[in-house]
């Protein structure tokens, strides 16, 4: 896994223009922001596709959590429609942390992060690339977990599905922005696995609460217009977190 990281970073380091990273050095022009971010995201996704370690760990955790909640649930005490939103967002929050920690941890063993820092790209582009890869990771977990929850709890989710997917996408954006920032801050510490949840979870709360409220109302059969305020609040937090985390990220990594 670390060898894959080092090899892929080697493609990024010589890059100095938009287009092919291998022949970019000859032009002397800097790599474009979005092209650099895409190279970083592609590198992380390629490594994860080859190993699938974090994805399978998060997927097993998500499906196991769904099963545990299902078989410890008393349907005579709590209706499925009341329980499912909480189950869904607990799973999304903690399974996402597994991938977020790996985002920078994969660079550490061979000091591949040094290659990224030495590359002629903006550090903001590095953050956007890492966050994009993490967003794809979280979206894949959501794409499997939402149907699993609907199946296990026999939820009438078809009509509510567009609104739930919108809430899930907005929430994933906020969770990934905060999680990627704190993953970069804790990766060099001895207790990174412990510090990341401790630092990130309080900032997840403003994202998870509106998403869970919107999900609960949509599953209860409320129209999308009735949850518009929650979705707007969620979008507002996304804008704040994305802006703040992108600006703060360059100060979290040392040369």
Image (cartoon, rainbow, N blue to C red):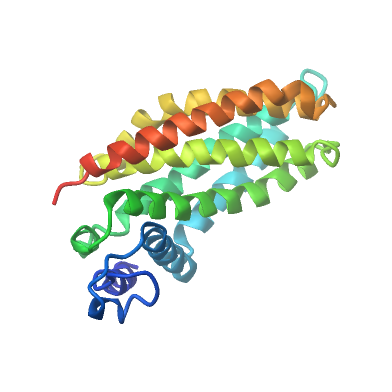
Question: Residue 73: percent from the left, percent from the top?
Answer: 72, 28
Residue at the far left: name it: 255
Left/right of residue 250 with respect to residue 164 in the rendered view: left
- Residue 168's spot in the image, x, y percent? 63, 39
Left or right placement of residue 119 versus residue 131 in this view: left
Q: Nearer the viewer, residue 244 or 221?
A: 244
Above or below: residue 75 compared with residue 125? above
Which residue sits furthest top?
A: 77
Task: Identify the residue shown where x is 42% and y is 26%.
Answer: 203
Position of 223 compared to 16: left or right? Answer: right
Residue at (60%, 54%) from the top-left corner? 140
Quarter of the figure with residue 77:
top right
Question: For the N terminus, which image quadrant?
Answer: bottom left
At x 72%, y 24%, the residue is: 227
Q: Nearer the viewer, residue 220 or 73?
A: 220
Seen at 51% across and 49% down, the residue is 135
């Amino acid at each position: 896994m670390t060898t894959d990281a080092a090899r892929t970073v080697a493609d990024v380091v010589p890059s100095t223009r938009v287009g092919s990273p291998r022949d970019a050095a000859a032009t002397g022009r800097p790599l474009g922001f979005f092209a650099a971010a895409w190279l970083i995201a592609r590198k992380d996704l390629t490594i994860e596709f080859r190993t699938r370690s974090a994805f399978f760990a998060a997927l097993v955790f998500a499906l196991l959590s769904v099963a545990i909640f299902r078989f410890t649930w008393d349907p005579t005490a709590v209706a499925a429609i009341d329980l499912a939103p909480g189950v869904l967002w607990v799973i999304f929050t903690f399974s996402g942390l597994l991938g977020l920690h790996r985002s920078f941890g994969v660079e550490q063993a061979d000091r591949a992060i040094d290659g990224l820092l030495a590359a002629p790209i903006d550090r903001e582009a590095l953050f956007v690339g890492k966050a994009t890869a993490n967003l794809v990771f979280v979206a894949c977990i959501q794409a499997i977990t939402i149907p699993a929850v609907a199946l296990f709890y026999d939820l009438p989710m078809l009509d509510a599905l567009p609104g739930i997917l919108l809430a899930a996408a907005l929430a994933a954006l906020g969770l990934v922005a905060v999680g990627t920032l704190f993953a970069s801050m804790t990766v060099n510490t001895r207790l990174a696995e412990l510090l990341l949840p401790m630092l990130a979870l309080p900032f997840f709360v403003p994202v998870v609460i509106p998403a869970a409220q919107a999900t609960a109302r949509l599953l209860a059969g409320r129209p999308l217009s009735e949850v518009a305020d929650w979705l707007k609040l969620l979008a507002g937090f996304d804008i704040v977190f994305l802006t703040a985390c992108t600006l703060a990220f360059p100060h979290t990594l040392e040369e």
